[in-house]
Image (cartoon, rainbow, N blue to C red):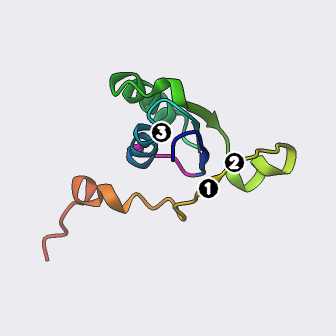
Amino acid sequence: MQGEIISDCCAAPRGKTLYMASLLSGQGMVYAIDINEGWLRILKEMAKLHQVDGVITTIHADMRSYTDNNTMKCDKVLLDAPCSGLGVLSKTCVGTGD
């Protein structure tokens, strides 16, 4: 993976992006694209904390329209559609009392 350019098209909440950036060992780039600006702000802070901020570029955009006016060359694309956030479901799920 070192030296590769990777696009994470639904970067929130941030775990996948940080993991891929750590695998780059400082060589390459992860473009973290997400519609949620708040998540991207947190991602930037976490990238600094994990010392991978040099290989992560955040882009606040909706991928459904971003590619209409922008081109991006990359080696790999990660699209975790529909960006469900199921990985954090146990932290946000509230029981119904059934």
The span shown in magenta is 10-14
Of the residues tagged 3 and 2, which is closer to the observer? Answer: 3
Residue 43, by quadrant, is: top left
Indicate the amino acid at tag 1.
Val
Residue 50, position in %: x, y? 34, 28
Pointer 2 local density, CA inside 10 Å: few below 14, some 14–19, many at least 20: few
Indicate the amino acid at tag 2.
Cys
Of the residues tagged 3 and 1, which is closer to the observer? Answer: 3
What numbered label is drawn on residue 24? 3
Q: Are marks 1 and 2 in contact (CB under 8 Å)?
A: yes
Mark-to-mark CA distance, 1 and 2: 7 Å
Q: Residue at x 42, y 49 (%)?
A: 16
Q: Quickly name the residue at label 2.
A: 74
Residue 77, position in %: x, y? 62, 56
Compare residues 33 and 97 and report the one nearer the observer. Answer: 33
Left/right placement of residue 82 relative to residue 48 reads right
Indicate the amino acid at tag 3.
Leu
For label 3, the SS is loop
Q: Which residue occupies the extreme left position in the image?
A: 97
How many labels were placed on the picture? 3
Q: Quickly name the residue at label 1.
A: 77
Q: Which residue occupies the extreme right position in the image?
A: 69
For label 2, the SS is loop
Quadrant the C terminus occupies? bottom left
Q: Is residue 13 magenta?
A: yes
